[in-house]
Amino acid sequence: MSEKEKALLQAEMNRRAFLKKSAAAGAAVGMMGLGMAQQQPTADQVVRGKNPRLIVLSSRPVVLESTLELLGSERITSKANLFIRNNIDLPGLNTTEPNIQPGWEVEITGLIDKPFKITVDELSKLPQTEVTSVLQCSGNGRSFFNPRPSGNPWTYGGVGHVTWRGVLLKTLLEAKGVKLDPKARFITMNASTQGGAAPYEKSFPISVMDYSSAMLALGMNGEPLPAVHGGPVRLVAAGTFGTANVKWIAKLEFTATESPGNEQVPRYRVPVLPGVNLPILPTQPGSRYNYTLENSRPNWMANINSFILSPLAGASVKGRLVEIRGVAWNDGLAPLETVEVSVNGGTSWRKAIIERDHGKFGWYQWVSPQLLAPGEYEVMARATDAVGRTQPMNGNIWWNERGYEWNGIMRVKFRVT
């Protein structure tokens, strides 16, 4: 074999070796990609019984976001479609099935004359009350702040409309013949640490989360409370953000001061200026803020808001008569009076028809029939209540570094054909 032939043979062997290694490497990358894809679970894999169309923001602790399409498909948000925002996960409870524990105890203590404990079974035998309310994470809409704050990147799906059933705290204290000390100013709630879960403690002012309307909920939407949504018992305070509605309640304490825990300060707070009647203190976008009990307040009462549920963004609608539909709500402290709709960038607004409300804490369902010629449109909606609270055109005016309490006017672009 000549030197030239030897060189060509060696080159061919080198080429084949290279291709073989490349194929092996490609296969490895492919398997790695498959493995990575398998590491991105769907919502029903994270929580048994959830709709797989929910968006997984976190697998641990569980954070699942619903969608406008799913929210618009139901009058009451089903347990399959309801969002989840967990700060802790109790082992074995990532399911929409009930958590049946009749002997589960809740300790009622603090500034009352006769502290006591009560089981879920005993609670179930007391007079029950039902309330339909909007449940919403105070970080819902966080992604619309600019620059985007830290935290889960919620868009619109951290909200739901549910019916709770349980025992009002007022009913419970009366049944036990318990009196509240005048010095009690806060309700401090502790979640269970069952299975080694991390402690979770929250306080809210009694003046805000009135103990006479708050309840220990045992049921949701006509069924026992799903495990992942706080079963067997959670605190529900209609009109407040979800952070006040502590799951898996183990202890409820009437206190003179707020909890000193991390969940109270600096988390779940917005800046305020003492003595100034503003929802929150405007802060420079991108700035930092040193949260204290004195210069901030907790996310307590839900602010006024409205969503457009039909048509959805990017939709094509046939016909000139277009029905724009949605929901609106507030904290229940004042009736929601109007929902206005604009299809011309806010130049003019037309009152929508409020078709139905679900009580002062629930959704107001509205519709706005519009005669629209073929073309591209951007529709906007804003709600206003009886005391004049309304939504800002630019929600970014209330920018805060933790991204709480977004309620800027919603805008949806769609086409009429």
Image (cartoon, rainbow, N blue to C red):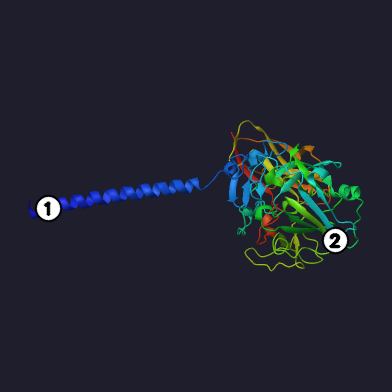
Residue occupied by mark 1: 6
Q: For the view shown, which residue lies furthest in the front direction?
A: 103
Q: Tell me the quarter of the picture where residue 124 sits.
A: top right
| Kind of residue indicated by mark 2 | Arg
Give the percent coordinates (x, y) of residue 73. 67, 36
Give the percent coordinates (x, y) of residue 33. 43, 48
Q: Are marks 2 and 1 in contact (CB under 8 Å)?
A: no
Residue occupied by mark 2: 185
Residue pictured at 71% horizontal, 67% vertical: 291
Q: Is residue 245 visible?
A: no
Give the percent coordinates (x, y) of residue 224. 74, 39
Question: Where is 241 relative to 81, above or below?
Answer: below
Residue pictured at 90% horizontal, 60% vertical: 181
Q: For the view shown, which residue lies furthest in the top direction?
A: 319
Q: Nearer the viewer, residue 91 or 3?
A: 91
Residue pictured at 73% horizontal, 68% vertical: 292
Q: Tell me the quarter of the picture where residue 341 sits.
A: top right
Give the percent coordinates (x, y) of residue 101. 73, 44
Few, some or many residues within 10 Å of mark 1 (<14, 14–19, 20+): few
Identify the mark at residue 396; answer none if there is no mark: none
Q: Secondary structure at mark 1?
A: helix
Question: Where is 394 relative to 323, above or below?
Answer: below
- Give the total number of marks visible in the rendering: 2
Residue pictured at 87% horizontal, 48% vertical: 172
Few, some or many residues within 10 Å of mark 2 (<14, 14–19, 20+): some
Mark 2 or mark 1, which has the lower sequence index?
Answer: 1
Image quadrant holding the C terminus, namely: top right
Q: CA distance from mark 2 to mark 1?
A: 92 Å
| Kind of residue indicated by mark 1 | Lys
Q: Secondary structure at mark 2?
A: loop
Q: Is residue 319 visible?
A: yes
